[in-house]
Amino acid sequence: MHFSEVRVIEISPVPEQESRSAFDPVRADGHSDEDLDQQPFGIICLDAAGKILRYNLAEARFARLDRASVLGKRFFGQVAPCTATPEFEGRFISFAAGTAPTQRFDYLFDFKFGAQRVEIELVRGAPGRFYLLVNRRQFLPVREKPFRPAPTQAELAPGEAQRGVSRDAFQQRSVAVTPPFFEAMRATWDRVAPKGWGLFCAEWGLKWGRLAVIDLETEALERLDRTLREVPMKKVVEMVGAFLARQGWGQVSADFTKARQGAFVLHLQRGAFAESIGFSEVPRCHLFAGFFRAIFSHLSDKLLAVREVACAAQGYPRCSFVVAGLSRRPALEAAIVQGDGDVDAVMRQLLGEPDARA
């Protein structure tokens, strides 16, 4: 059987004034849960008896399980019964009893929605703690005779809907939030920290975007057998748009007319965030500026600046954002002041083009 090439995906650091150390699997115990969640491969921490102690976002997404439902459970017996074999559990028991720092082997995971060919790396953590690093190599259909496929989320945690739990198509927990929620949040910030809203939302969007990168990367690998950077930009924008549309945030489109000159425009039509805020004299969608900065900085593998030029909260028909290299950030901010909500004027000034109206 043909194996896909193993893909190593690095999640680029995107804050404008921040550096981030690379993830070191051998020192996984020293990394926070946030660090683990930003890795595009599965990471599971077990004790010597196989109880799950840590479980990162990528593994939850690939396995379509909620980490809250698996923490504390036995990995081999309850969560991944297809691994209760000499080839997997037997290797883990021997590894836990030995002294080798790492061990690698290939395996085939069985799920009721399909099979996944993976590469496993066992890594020794602190005493009594062991990490499984799970790199997906190939996605396959459901096998006719699967060996004890993993339980679904509904089987692992039955009756969730009756207890007020809602999940999306990938079994990630979802919560429906109406506009008054964001209106109340904005009003609170305006009262207690009037100048803090933009900073808070930009950082919030940045963190959200980093986590969304993991979701988009897993989708690209599952559906297209490619990493996100291997997907054409137009298709990536479609994926980002579908991601946001599924959650009710609005419709995303892009204008790459000036992309060869180092900048492009993103539009968000019927943005739920802007519509929830009410009228404003200044742009308010810093959340999406941070979100887009995380996504497109990852794609370009370099830091970018993203600024909202026009916001629906100001009365414009849509929210428009300009994406440019970080070195152009001062010029972009000056162009936004001069452009006064005119996206074309901002782009012309940013790129040093003559004013067509002159």
Image (cartoon, helix red, strand yellow):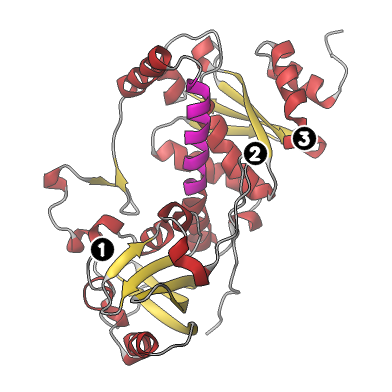
Residue 172 pos. (x, y %): 32, 51
Q: Is residue 66 visible?
A: no
- Main SS, magenta region, reads helix
Q: Which mark is residue 327?
A: 3
Tag 1: residue type?
Answer: Val
Residue at the spot of label 2? 17
Residue assigned mark 1: 70
Residue at (39%, 33%) from the top-left corner? 248
Q: Residues within 10 Å of mark 2 (few under 14, many from 20)?
A: few
- Mark 3: few/some/many CA within 10 Å (<14, 14-19, 20+): few
Pair 3/2: label in front? 2
Tell me if label 1 and label 3 are in contact, CB under 8 Å.
no
Tell which of 48 and 250 is nearer to you. Answer: 48
User: In the image, what residue type sits under mark 2?
Assistant: Gln
Picture quadrant where residue 154 is located: bottom left
Q: Are marks 3 and 2 in contact (CB under 8 Å)?
A: no
Task: Tell me which residue sits at (33%, 76%) in the image.
Answer: 128
Q: Position of residue 133 (x, y in %)?
A: 46, 72
For label 3, the SS is: helix
For the residue marked with disc 3, what is the amino acid? Ser
SS at mark 2 in the image: loop
Q: CA distance from mark 2 to mark 1?
A: 36 Å
Q: Report how far apart the C-alphas of labels 3 and 2 lie in the structure.
A: 12 Å
Q: Is residue 207 magenta?
A: yes
Rounded to the nearest angstrom, the CA distance separating label 1 from label 3 is 44 Å
Give whichever of discs 3 and 2 has the lower sequence position: 2
Q: Earlier in the sequence, mark 2 or mark 1?
A: 2
**Vertically, is 139 above or below 247?**
below
Q: Is residue 104 magenta?
A: no
Quadrant assignment, res 277:
top left
Q: Which residues are magenta?
A: 196-212
> Residue 4, can we see it?
yes
